[in-house]
Amino acid sequence: MGAESMERIGLRRKPKQERSIQRLDIILAAAAQIIAKKGVSAMRMTELAIAAKVPIGSVYQYFPEKAAIVKALFDQHASAIQTKTAAMFSDVQSLDQALDLVCDIIDWYYDSYHDDPVYLGVWMGTETDQDLLRLNIEHSSRVAGIFHDAVRRLAPDLCDEEVFARTYLFSHLIGAVIRLAAVSEEALARRMLTEWKRVIRASLFTEAAPRAA
């Protein structure tokens, strides 16, 4: 876990030594295993300490409550998605290619996470938990920045407030669509993703319509 991630999730204590950072990662890995087996609501801090093979005080040293662990796991998933998106967009050469990449990201996102019980358990909490909702909005903003940077480089004339708002909106909706697809029957999920990619190709990077006088 990097320093930026630690700042976002608000750890009770930030580890500075490599050994402490490794212990933090071990705790999160154990939490992910428990959530995968039992779900978020069934995880207990004492059980987590046993699974991670650390004293219960070490768990509370970093995480004052279970919600803080869920936030940390959320941030791990979000960071992986942002890293993948940034890597795919690092050498984009045209807006058409950028649209292809957004659609590829949607397929990768769904294929990677739709059968992941940890992802589902953590990300579904964005609909009810205010801290997770805030982190999700920040995540959407960072992904939108990757999209908007591509437009700025490839078609600077399109870089207006409307296009920025659209990249922000679409980056947030991509996550929402994936989560809906992840809890839907497979054939329906694929059809929804196909329709969503069609909408993206038709409108994500298009020129804004003229405003009425």
Image (cartoon, rainbow, N blue to C red):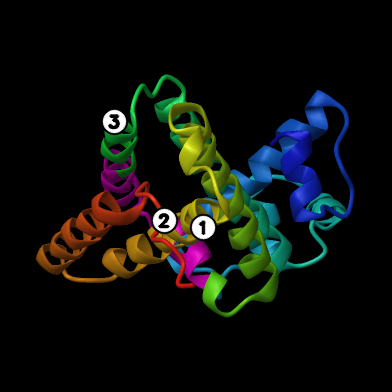
Q: Residue furthest front?
A: 213
Please report the bounds of the magenta region as a residue range.
103-125
- Locate residue 157, reporting x and y percent: 48, 38
- Locate residue 67, reporting x and y percent: 69, 68
Which is nearer the N-term, disc 1 or disc 2?
Answer: 1
Residue 162 bears which disc, if any?
1
Tell me the amino acid under the disc marked 1: Glu
Q: Can the viewer see residue 73 in this picture? A: no
Q: Is 11 part of what is drawn in magenta?
A: no
Nearer to me, 91 or 185: 91
Residue 126 bears which disc, if any?
none
> Mark 2 and mark 1 in contact (Cβ < 8 Å)?
yes
Q: Determine the CA span between mark 1 and mark 2.
A: 6 Å
Which is nearer the N-term, disc 1 or disc 3?
Answer: 3
| Residue at (77, 44) in percent of width and height | 6
Query: In the structure shown, which secondary structural element does the residue marked by tag 1 occupy?
Result: helix
Q: Residues within 10 Å of mark 2 (few under 14, many from 20)?
A: some
Left or right of residue 14: residue 39: left
Residue 208 bears which disc, if any?
2
Seen in the picture, residue 86 relative to 204 is either above or below; the reply is above
Query: In the structure shown, which secondary structural element does the residue marked by tag 2 occupy?
Result: loop
Q: How many marks?
A: 3
Q: Determine the CA span between mark 2 and mark 3.
A: 20 Å
Query: Secondary structure of the magenta portion, mostly?
Result: helix
Nearer to me, 134 or 10: 134
Seen in the picture, residue 10 relative to 14 is either above or below; the reply is below
Seen in the picture, residue 60 relative to 156 is either above or below; the reply is below
Left or right of residue 134: residue 94: left
| Residue at (35, 47) in percent of width and height | 109
- Residue beneath disc 3: 97
